[in-house]
Image (spheres, rainbow, N blue to C red):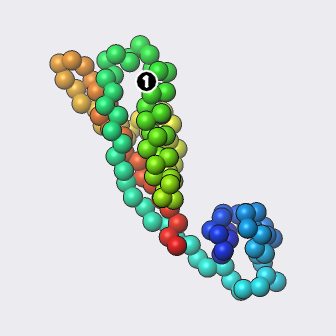
Amino acid sequence: MFCSQCGTRHPNDAKFCMKCGTPFGAGAAGGTARQHRWEYKDITIPLNMNIKYHLNYLAEYQQQAETIITTHLQREGADGWQPEGPTDTASLEGRVKYKNSLFGTKAESISLRLRRLVP
C-alpha cells in the first residue's frame, strides 16, 4: 500500500503514513488511495576496468566496481530513480559487458534497470 499524499510504501495493515501522517483505512478522509505506477529505464554504467590486473584481487575489483555503480546510482537517485533489484557485483555478474584482447580482459560496462514512481 502506498500513501496517497507522499507515495511512501507501507504494510497493508498500516493505519497512518509513517512519513506524512495521512490516515489509511475505511474511516480515513479522502476515500480510496490513488493507484501508483512505476516507470522504468535501463542504464549502462561504464566500468573500464582491466580484469587481468584484478584477477588476484577479487575483493578490490568488487569494491571499485561497487563504488562506480553507487556513484551513478546516487546521481540517478536525485531524480527519483532507484534500482529495481540488487546492485552488488555478485548479483550483477551476468550484466557486465566484457571485452577480450591480447592484453587481457576488460570489464567495459554494466547494465541496470531503474524505476521511479510516476507522479
Residue in the image at 34% along x and 16% along y? 53
Mark 1 highlights which residue?
Answer: 61
Q: Position of residue 116 (x, y in %)?
A: 50, 62
Residue in the image at 41% along x and 48% along y? 112
Q: Which image quarter is the N terminus in?
A: bottom right
* Residue 4 shown left or right of residue 55 in the figure: right
Residue in the image at 77% along x and 69% along y? 21
Q: Position of residue 105 (x, y in %)?
A: 27, 24
Q: Position of residue 93 (x, y in %)?
A: 41, 35
Q: Can you say whether 116 is above or below 63 in the image?
A: below
Q: Quadrant of residue 61?
A: top left
Q: Quadrant of residue 65?
A: top left
Q: Can you say whether 34 is above or below 37 in the image?
A: below
Residue in the image at 73% along x and 68% along y? 20
Q: Can you say whether 21 is above or below 109 in the image?
A: below
**Is there any visible trace of residue 30 in the rendered image?**
yes
* Residue 34 shown left or right of residue 84 in the figure: right
